Image: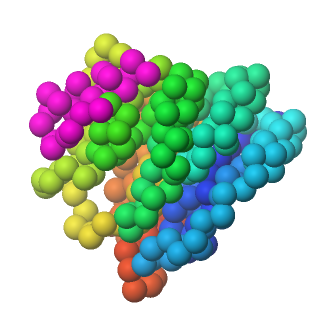
Amino acid sequence: MKASALTIAGSDSGAGAGIQADLKTFSKLGVYGATVITAITAQNTLGVQEVLVLPVKTVISQLNSVLSDLHIAAAKTGMLASADIIEALVEQLSQKQIPKLVVDPVMIAASGDPLIHEGAVKALKEKLLPLSLVVTPNLSEAEVLSGLQLTGEKSRLKEAARRIADLGPRWVLLKGGHIPGGSCVDLLFDGRDFLEFSAPRVPIDNPHGTGCTLSAALTAYLVLGCSVPEAVEKAKAYLTAALKRSFAVGAGYPPVNNLAGTAG
């Protein structure tokens, strides 16, 4: 059977992030993508108007259906709105032993709208992160996970990565897109050593779907057999190309053009 990728995330009706962005990314990179939808959002480029969190039973039914039939080589999580969903997913994923799990700790949309219940953060830190191969927080998410206030100072970023690694993930990818400067520098930490990945900043105001796209590309490259550092390097190049070719589709924040990313 062909190795496939799985995304466990929310649906974005505007298709700039979430399940829709993940599937576009998987397809562009030649990887078959399956889905487990955790929430349905009424969302466009201007913001999030409504969120419907799906029942835990429905989420787990989707997961069991996919895993009972498809050969999932790597999976990623995105919007996991509630502690109940996280705890149920952890129970099932622990039994199924997904070999490569990427956790994108989605908390806030590009528009500033919250996408996770407050109590879910504790479950994410204590129960989901220990199962993960890679966790991919942006600056604000890293602050929540590490308990540190971050401004871009490298020593504090490294300390935040160390604290997040202590929560259990084997690799921490701390993304630098929200740090001012001419380049976006991401830090990858394996519990011992740091690697830096830099790309020129693409001058777009608050693009929509960057985190989903990067983590989906990372997951796809893991399916294709890349090591974690190789997958990060390729995923960052893919996102940069997709950002360069993004364009306005509505009156708000421009979504990443997932189908314009470079497969390499």
Q: Nearer the viewer, residue 146 or 25?
A: 146
- Residue 209 horizontal side relative to residue 31, left or right: left
Query: Image quadrant for the N terminus?
Result: top right
Residue 183: x and y in percent read: 18, 51
Q: Residue at the spot x=45%, y=34% of the render?
A: 135
| Way the structure is coloured | rainbow
| Residue lying at the far front of the rendered structure | 119
Q: Residue at x 21, y 39 (%)?
A: 149
Magenta span = 147-167
The answer to whether residue 27 is seen in the rendering is no
Looking at the image, which residue is at 32% across and 23% down?
163
Left or right? Give the position of 153 relative to 201.
left
> Does residue 229 appear in the picture of this structure?
yes
| Residue 198 counted in the magenta span | no
Pick whichever, 59 or 219, lies toward us: 59
- Taking the image as shown, residue 35 lies to the left or right of residue 29, namely right
Rendered position, 192 above or below 186 = above
Residue found at the very far top of the displayed protein: 192
58 left or right of 10 in image: right
| x and y, in percent, of residue 189 in the image | 33, 24
Q: Residue 20's x, y, as percent?
A: 61, 63
